[in-house]
């Protein structure tokens, strides 16, 4: 009899979906992990043009079109002064596929992958799909990841550790000093650092830094995407970059899994990356304004909440039963333990929602917090 593979029986559908299903139709949804802005017009038009001219009809090269990979390389130089060879970029079906490639190409069965807890749900699941051993590590009080915690968790069986700055679900941005430490750890312990930078442009205080800027070895691969920066979650376009030998291994997985990223999305991404920056700047300042309003509202409600410096999430400490009561009162939030055991006692709120709705939600939060003590 054909049974199911153990690796698939070991994972389940994310707890986030269960929350959405529990919510009423008119609920204010602070659970979403995607910007509430339109994809920039120039990106949409580039896809339409590519479709209508027939340019998008065929497979592209496995790594993606030359012009998209050049645009990605140029963006790293323009935005962060990082030198990326377009030949060492694979365009993927979102950051999700890029994470999958990085883990699949570097993790042998039984090897450990260290990642933040609470952290983005895919790190645990993708490790299990590669028959690896998920090794979640706790965060500091301010919800950043302490490099010393990562270093202490490294064993002979560690294949990789994941750094995610700015982070989902915390909104935390790692300091430059931490990022330098992650690079040193990757070098000295000879383990791979998978740097998930899909929120790289959504930073309010300080600057985004990547371990790839500082590593002396090739032990860093970087995952990026158009999804959050250009509000293109539906287009499914991301990328992974690293040294040539690593990219060539990841390409083997990508070639058989995906062949190439969607061609229309590649043309849209190229236009997004090379086009005017105003849509990104406007979105980031809207997020910052909302962050401030949400922080004030949560603090006024009496909740303890670390200040997030990026992405569009905030993670207050909440009393037992708070999330259920909030959902019953018409506001969706995600319980912190959906992102790992150490997320218990927290909730993730996304402020990728218009200001009026946010203010309404904050009033409800105030009531709920007063009730659930
Ligand atoms: C930290 C993090 N990495 C990767 C992804 C995947 O992004 P994409 O939609 O590009 O697959 C997400 C999406 O929520 C995320 O939050």
Image (cartoon, helix red, strand yellow):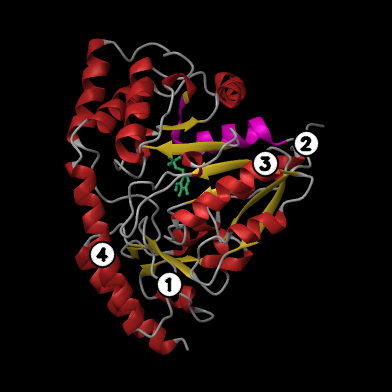
Residue occupying the point 27% across, 17% down: 51
**Which segment did they paint magenta?**
90-107
Q: Is residue 167 visible?
A: no
> How far is the residue under mark 1 from the one under mark 3?
30 Å
Q: According to the image, label 1 marks what residue?
A: 306
- Observer-nearest residue: 164 or 331? 164
At mark 4, the secondary structure is helix
- Residue 301, given in percent of the width and then of the height, sits at 35, 84
Q: Nearer the viewer, mark 1 or mark 2?
A: 1
| Residue 229 on image: x %, y % | 32, 43
Q: Earlier in the sequence, mark 1 or mark 2?
A: 2
| Residue beneath the point at 75% across and 37% down | 5
The reply to whether the residue tagged 2 has its Cβ within 8 angstroms of ligand 1 is: no
The secondary structure type at the circle numbered 1 is loop
Measure the C-alpha gap from mark 2 to mark 3: 35 Å
Quickly name the residue at label 4. 290
Count of all numbered marks drawn on residues in the image:
4
Give yes or no for residue 99 being in the magenta stretch: yes
Front in this rendered view, residue 64 or 262? 64
Query: Which disc number belongs to residue 191?
Result: 3
């Amino acid at each position: 009899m054909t049974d199911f593979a153990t690796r698939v029986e070991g994972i389940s559908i994310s707890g986030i979906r269960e929350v959405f299903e529990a919510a009423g139709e008119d609920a204010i949804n602070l659970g979403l992990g995607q910007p509430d802005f339109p994809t920039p017009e120039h990106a949409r038009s580039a896809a339409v043009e590519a479709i209508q001219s027939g340019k998008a009809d065929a497979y592209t090269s496995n790594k993606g079109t030359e012009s998209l990979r050049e645009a990605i390389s140029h963006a790293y130089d323009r935005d962060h002064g990082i030198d990326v060879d377009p030949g060492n970029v694979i365009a993927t079906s979102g950051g999700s596929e890029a994470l999958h490639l990085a883990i699949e190409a570097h993790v042998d069965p039984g090897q450990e992958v260290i990642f933040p807890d609470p952290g983005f749900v895919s790190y645990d699941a993708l490790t299990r799909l590669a028959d690896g051993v998920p090794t979640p590590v706790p965060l500091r009080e301010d919800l950043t990841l302490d490099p010393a915690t990562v270093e202490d968790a490294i064993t002979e069986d560690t294949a990789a550790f994941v750094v995610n700055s700015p982070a989902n679900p915390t909104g935390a941005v790692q300091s430059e000093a931490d990022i330098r430490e992650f690079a040193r750890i990757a070098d000295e312990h000879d383990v791979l650092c998978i740097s998930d930078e899909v929120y790289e442009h959504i930073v309010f205080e300080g600057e985004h830094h990547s371990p790839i800027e500082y590593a002396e070895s090739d032990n860093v691969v970087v995952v990026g995407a158009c999804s959050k920066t250009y509000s293109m979650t539906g287009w499914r376009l991301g990328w992974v970059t690293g040294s040539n030998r690593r990219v060539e291994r990841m390409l083997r997985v990508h070639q058989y899994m995906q062949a190439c990223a969607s061609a229309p999305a590649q043309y849209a991404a190229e236009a997004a990356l090379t086009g005017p920056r105003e849509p990104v700047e406007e979105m980031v300042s809207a997020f910052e304004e909302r962050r401030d309003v949400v922080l004030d509202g949560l603090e006024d409600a009496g909740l303890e909440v670390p200040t997030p410096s990026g992405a569009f999430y905030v993670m207050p400490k909440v009393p037992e039963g708070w999330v259920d009561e909030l959902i019953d009162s018409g506001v969706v939030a995600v319980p912190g333990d959906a992102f790992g055991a150490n997320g218990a006692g927290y909730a993730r709120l996304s402020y990728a929602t218009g200001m009026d709705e946010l203010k309404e939600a904050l009033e409800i939060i105030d009531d709920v917090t007063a009730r659930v003590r």
